[in-house]
Amino acid sequence: MEERAVKPWLDRYPPEIPAAITYSGTNLVDSFLNAAKLYRDKKAVHFLGKSITFQDVSEQAFKLASYLQEIGLKRGDRVAIMLPNCPQAVISFYGVMLAGGVAVQTNPLYMERELEYQMNDSGATFIISIDMLYPRISKVKALTKIEHVIMTRIQDYLPLVKKVLYPYVQKKQSSVQVSLEHSGTTHLFSEIMKRTNETFTKYEIDAENDLAIIQYTGGTTGFPKGVMLTHKNLVSNATMCSHWLYRCKNGEEKVLGILPFFHVYGLTTVLILAILQGYEMILMPRFDAKSVLKTIHKQRPTLFPGAPTIYIALLNHLDLQKYDLSSIDACISGSAPLPVEVQEQFEKVTGGKLVEGYGLTESSPVTHANFVWEERVSGSIGLPWPDTDAKIFSMETGEEAGVKEIGELAVKGPQIMKGYWNQPAETEAVLRDGWLLTGDVGYMDERGYFYIVDRKKDMIIAGGYNIYPREVEEILYEHPKIKEAVVAGVPDPYRGETVKAYVVLKDGEVCTEDELNKYSRQYLAAYKVPRIYEFREELPKTAVGKILRRSLVDEERQKQQERKIN
């Protein structure tokens, strides 16, 4: 009873969800090997018309692990995986785990500058990617510690007809045409898979301390930071997810894999969960609303982790009524607040349940969610997951806040990161006695439901992507006509937030939005490029000259509020 007084949310739990979990396995390698044995002949991955079994995935992951060790991978070496969602992404992730490496999940949309920074910061010596990205990788390879490049092709895992047609589609969609040979430090995934050797050194894993991935995320200052997530962090969070979805049956569900694996949300709730529970992953390399509708109609997925922008795009598609989405049983939405009308409309269309959750990269990522099949509270991020503790701390006193008192949300549990890669001061700033200070401001009600009211951090979340203002600002400051620039996230009905740049030009200079847009696209991934530019004579500042970003955001919200009233 004492624990339930401290954790009032436990009284809300249905009998099927335990307050504490007994974990059957705490590292990714053992959970993968168990799944390969239990679900050997079952479909593990469906990709654009072709399926491969758990046995196929395990054999190919063994081959990759063997090859990585053969060409020099040592325990703890970092391997960048720069792939869209495809079978190779699944095989590569577990191949790296089996070989004793640490995966550095890398966004395929990264431009040279972003890629160079992440490779140098992580110290990655291997990279696995697709052929069309080879020119980008080759430009930065000499500027990093990358020694070996393993390249694959999307068409290698397509059905025969699509495999033949794909090069023509690729040529139409992209001007980049690459022809590579398996020699030297460039290795072809297809050649590695032809090998018969599956022998590799299997290391004993300290699940609590051995890193599985370095996942990059942002903060209030500087470039993205590498979040160190251990095997225990990731397996624990996926196991919590399986208990929250207690009606789902091992070995029987199909999970739609639209969320990218280079984001920890997709990695945990699609890839790791599916392997752990024997689910089939229906993978899509990129989001296209019509393709997603067709895929749901034909492949009949039962689970659909996503983000509000994804659900909104599907609901607003002109052909929505042509497709049967009734296979969807459960969806957990993350990355941004879920509008109530979107939730209700999507449930009406599918007949399934769509609930909002909350998490951070630093927590692997999920800490809270609304119940899927029981009571849920609109506007709330829900309740802490099993084995997860949460508190609100007063920002004035640092003491634990009372019920409905606003403060900073802190979370604690087996999914909380080990720290930031090579950044002890940043780690110390957010980890206190096992508690992670989230930087998000909110409160807890008397029943244990949590609510987020604001974000301390300046990080922008647009369409589910994390965008770090300073990174964009530094690009803008390099433009010869710009005197000052500040970037902020402003409300957007579709993306949740969108990137807005406030710009002060140098005296006598003239510049247009189109000019800045073209310039930014040379150096930033498309989702980071400002969608709105506002030219100003000056920017609001403190007495010591610091630009008041928050006042600009507040000003924008006020403008939008006035427009609604009028």
Image (tube, helix red, strand yellow):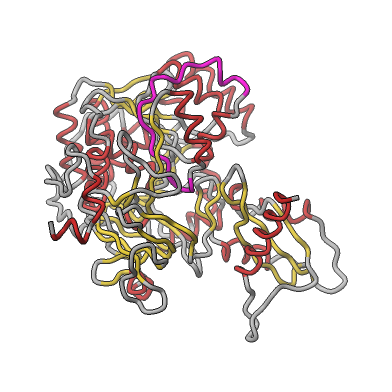
> Is residue 28 visible in this depiction of the protein?
yes
Dividing the image into 4 quarters, which one contains the N terminus?
bottom left
**The magenta stretch spans which residues?**
318-337
| Residue 334 part of the magenta-drawn span | yes
476 relative to 400 in the view: left or right: right
> Is residue 148 visible in this depiction of the protein?
no
Q: Quadrant of residue 190?
A: top left
Q: Nearer the viewer, residue 99 or 381?
A: 381
* Residue 480, above or below 156: below
* Residue 151, above or below 524: above
Residue at 41%, 78% (x, y): give it: 396
* Residue 467, above or below 504: above
Q: Quadrant of residue 391?
A: bottom left
Q: Identify the main secondary structure in magenta.
A: loop
Image x and y of residue 287, in percent: 52, 33
The residue positioned farthest toward the front in the image shown: 446
* Residue 507, above or below 472: below
Image x and y of residue 29, in percent: 19, 43
Image x and y of residue 71, in percent: 29, 47
91 relative to 291 in the view: left or right: left
288 relative to 372 in the view: left or right: right
Q: Nearer the viewer, residue 57 or 380?
A: 380
The residue positioned farthest toward the bottom in the image shown: 544
The residue positioned farthest toward the right in the image shown: 508
| Residue 44 part of the magenta-drawn span | no
Image x and y of residue 543, in percent: 65, 86
Q: Nearer the viewer, residue 8 or 522?
A: 8
